[in-house]
Image (cartoon, helix red, strand yellow):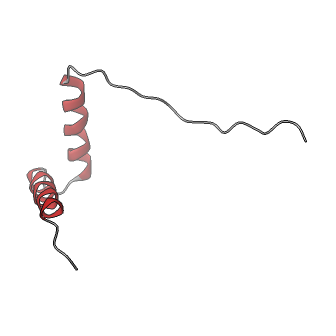
Amino acid sequence: MIKDPIVEEVRKYRDEHVAAYGHDIKRIAASLREREAKSQRLLLNPGPKYLLRKTGS
């Protein structure tokens, strides 16, 4: 398998991030929600997408 340096870097930062929260998904999610709440960026929630029924024959 070919080693991609970008993928390796992303994995390294991901491993550091999860280790900072003790690999606890609830703590990770809580920190991301907190970061999102503090953000000054416009957050979009497009909601679910519904399929339209075909009409006609």
* Residue visible at 19% across and 31% down in the picture: 35
**In this picture, is 55 found above or below 3?**
above
Is 13 on the left or on the right of 31, as rendered?
left
* Residue visible at 88% across and 37% down in the picture: 56
Is 4 on the left or on the right of 50, as rendered?
left
Q: Quadrant of residue 8?
A: bottom left
Taking the view exactly as shown, the residue that stands out farthest to the bottom is 1
Q: Quadrant of residue 55?
A: top right
**In this picture, is 54 found above or below 25?**
above
**In this picture, is 10 found above or below 51?**
below
Is 49 on the left or on the right of 39, as rendered?
right
Which is more toward the observer, 15 or 4? Answer: 4
**Quadrant (top left/top right/bottom left/bottom right) for the N terminus:** bottom left
Residue 54: x %, y % from top left: 79, 39
Residue 31: x %, y % from top left: 19, 38
**In this picture, is 41 found above or below 13?**
above
Which is more toward the observer, 29 or 12? Answer: 12
* Residue visible at 9% across and 55% down in the picture: 16
